[in-house]
Image (cartoon, coloured by chain):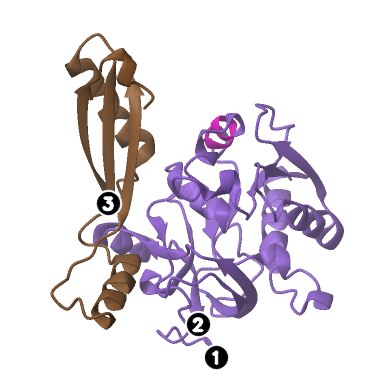
Amino acid sequence: MKIGVVVFPGSNCDHDAYYALKHELGVEAVFLFHKEHDLKGVDAIVLPGGFSYGDYLRCGAIARFSPIMTEVIKFAQSGGPVIGICNGFQILCEAGLLPGALLRNRDLRFISKHVGIRVVNNRTIFTGDLESGAVLHIPIAHGEGNYHADPDVLAELNAEGRVVFQYCDDHGNVTDEANPNGSQFNIAGIVNAKGNVLGMMPHPERACSTLLGSHDGLGIFRSLAHSLEIVAA
Amino acid sequence: MYKAEVNVTLRPAILDVQGKTVEHALHSLGFNSVGHVRIGKHITFEIEAASLEEAQKIARQVSEQVLSNPVMEDFAVTVHEVIAEEAGA
């Protein structure tokens, strides 16, 4: 099993993701450079966090047109698993692989802290090892993470169980106080209709070791690895 | 040669937190008659095209596909012809 981590100019969580996959999870990880068209035969792709192209124009707007993204879009459209984290989530929205957009945080601040997120749907390939309703403690670090979509899109996401994570308090209550950025319905992560593309603002790769204060993020990568094994077998 | 000016703004339905913050600052300075502050982007570029219609078409495509995100933004385009010496100014 091989998982690719895309490197854009301005990515800054690419090495964290690589480390988490290779050394904490124990799968083969490779970097995929933005200028290339070769996915190196990977089984899944991570679009990491950072500030691709300096967040110029809009977060993720330029990265979406990178040569590698042509291949990532084809890979995702043919059912290949893709996780977009933070800036990666913004890129997936800009690329049209996920609905909606990430607006400026409602208090205009860049927020960097640990938050609670509730596992709303554990029947995805990214959450199969997690318990439904479980609270994960994972850091966020963003200025534009305020999830917005039109009412009909939100209704569809809710009806189809595509809201995977919601910001919550320590007890799993989804409240406005626990919403760090003003996201509609406290949305922290969603999947596409096919369920093979996940976008999330919190950083699971920064929560893969007890040394770093939490290993709650590892369950997401482990779920993906287990679902890939099942498909391969 | 044509010059395009594009104004990109958040859709009216979307709360413009930046505009709101500026509005609060203006009110605290005593500009109480000011309201509904909205902040957007102003983008200019030049286009080589055979006609005004062609230039307008290109400017609209550029605005739709790259300069704005229809989920959250609207845009307005104006295009006018410039003589060569003016270009780049």
State which mark lies toward you, 1 or 3: 3
Rounded to the nearest angstrom, the CA distance separating label 1 from label 2 is: 8 Å
Report the residue that reaches farthest toward the front.
B85
Q: Is residue A117 magenta?
A: no
Which corner quadrant of the image does residue A72 belong to?
top right
Report the residue that reaches farthest toward the top.
B50
Q: What residue type is labelled 3?
A: Thr
x%, y% of residue A136?
62, 77
Is A228 left or right of B70, judged from the image as shown? right
Which corner quadrant of the image does residue B57 belong to?
top left
Q: What residue type is labelled 1?
A: His
Q: The brown chain is which one?
A: B
Instruction: Please give the chain letter of the residue carrying mark 3.
Output: B
Determine whether label 1 and label 2 are within 8 Å by CB.
Answer: yes
Q: Nearer the viewer, residue A4 or B42?
A: B42
x%, y% of residue B66?
39, 36
State whether residue A203 is above or below residue B73: below
Secondary element under disc 2, as helix, strand or loop, is strand
Instruction: Please give the chain letter of the residue carrying mark 2.
Output: A
Q: Which residue is drawn at 44% across and 83% down?
A: A174
Q: For mark 3, what is the residue?
A: B9
Q: Which residue is drawn at 26% across and 72% down?
A: B23
Is A114 left or right of B24, judged from the image as shown? right
Q: For mark 1, what is the residue?
A: A171
State which mark lies toward you, 2 or 3: 3
Range covered by the magenta-colored residues = A69-74
Chain A appears what colour?
A: purple
Q: Which of A71 and A94 is in front in this view?
A: A94
Q: Where does the C terminus of chain A fall, quadrant-wise? A: top right
